[in-house]
Image (spheres, rainbow, N blue to C red):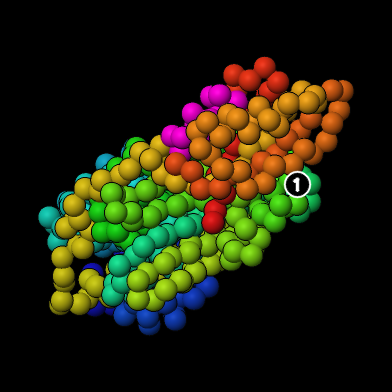
Amino acid sequence: MSEQKLKIGLLGMGTVGGGVAAILERHREALSEKAGAELVLERVLVRDPRRPRAVDLPAERFTTEAASILHDPSIDLVVELMGGIEPARSYILEALRRGKYVVTANKDLMARHGTELLEEAQRHRARIYYEASVGGGIPLIRPLKHCLAANRIEKVIGIINGTTNYILTRMALEGSSFQEALAEAQARGFAEADPANDLEGRDAAYKLAIIAALAFRRRIAVEDIYVEGIAGVAAEDIRYARELGYAIKLLAVGEELLQGLALRVHPTLVPATHPLASVLHEFNAVYVVGDAVGEVMFYGRGAGAMPTGSAVVADIIDAARTMRSRIKDGIMETTFAPASVLPVSRLVSRFYLRLQAQDRPGVFAALATAFGEEQVSLDMIIQKRSEAGTAEIVLVTHDVIEERFNRAMQRIEACEAIETVNSVFRVLE
Ligand code: NAP
Ligand code: HSE
């Protein structure tokens, strides 16, 4: 980096890259002052240079050749906003090997290959920053690494996928269909290019792997996280949950228990009085409990061009300042030991269950017997309506270890009077 300029190579200029370019343009002078150098968007890698962009840049700044950024010694910082694993991983490794600093918003990559990238950065005395990979514009990585460092973190519970929270909110507040709400989340740039990762909970699992690693100071293998998406959440469940005093949210939960870490992503009934219940639309929130600080909640826009661009530009400024600083400490994450993650069958939870049963005497007794034989205690049981000889039954259990609940479910599914089990969701205390 020259004394006056920090040259940036941008890999990708779609939703987030457009936001970054817009912020760099909008606050050019103030940002340069904060960074201690003029921030220059030197070259931008895209697939199709003719596509219109959020910010007009001279045509010669665009390239389809990654090497023209990665091999250019005058480029100090590479900002990866392409998404996906390859070629993003190889490009970042190449940049780090050449001593360039890297900023990325790529949670898939950081969750699956973060250790490799951080170790490569350490080896080459470079840095990789990833604040935008979780929670869009919400500061989370730095607070977990630095501001809460005095604590033993007991749990992190987050709504960390904007697309699914947007869909669940639209279904709950406006009665929108799943497909309508998804189309809108896509049009507004919240969803991934392929929204399957959002809908099936994997995007939230990647983000949980990243924040749980920092919260519990462990290396997390993303395959160890139990994941369920929102496909099974029906309008009826949202309505019944509301009647019972809950909102349904896709939660990512990390807890440090005596026997190991519990890490899971699944739709959850959240009490209406809990702060996470009022997190709506594309907003995200992460609720952290530390032994010294108590409860802390981080809240803000979890997706979109400008919120995510805000976190990326903050990383660019941090990178610029660190490059100029003479003090360079090691990368904390490279010291983490592997986590021991508990199987979900050993965790304890309350459950919500919706099922269709024959509307005849003895059905409640059959349910009570199936649960009773597995010592699952019921908190609420309601027959919701009756149509053509079929009753809809909604029930909520008390705390139960999951393997015991699953055995009770096998008994229930085998009952002649039970026609279908529609939904099973966990309930947050
Ligand atoms: P996007 O809109 O799909 O943009 C991707 C950009 O990368 C496009 O400019 C595309 O070029 C370029 N690109 C992709 N593959 C390429 C390749 N092989 N060679 C050259 N250029 C390539 O994606 P996005 O929504 O901005 O997301 C970028 C990253 O940020 C992802 O990792 C995503 O998970 C993460 N993120 C997104 C959000 C959000 O709200 N969208 C929030 C937080 C984090 P063309 O334009 O020519 O096609
Ligand atoms: N697809 C992601 C979401 C983008 O909906 O949360 C932000 O990471």
Q: Is residue 88 left or right of residue 189?
A: left
Ligand 2 within 8 A of label 1's CB?
no
Residue 167 visible in rendering: no
**Observer-nearest of 45 and 325:** 325
Q: Quadrant of the C terminus?
A: bottom right
Task: State the SS at label 1.
Answer: helix
Farthest residue, direction left: 123
Magenta portion: prevailing SS class: helix
Measured as percent of width and height from the top left, residue 64 is found at 39, 42
Q: Name the residue under label 1.
A: 239
> Going 30% across and 59% down the picture, which residue do you hit?
216
Q: Does the magenta stretch include residue 252?
A: no
In magenta stretch: residue 409 = yes
Q: Which amino acid does label 1 sit on?
A: Arg
Image x and y of residue 52, in percent: 58, 49
Q: Is 342 rendered above or below residue 218?
A: above
Residue in view at x 12 percent, y 55 percent: 123
- Report the side of 80 relative to 302 (left or right): left
From this view, report whether residue 377 is shown above or below residue 211.
Answer: above
Residue stretch in magenta: 402-412
Residue sitting at x 42%, y 59%: 156
Q: Can you give x and y, in whole percent of width and height, for residue 400 in the image? A: 49, 43
**In this orientation, which residue lies closer to the viewer: 408 or 175?**
408
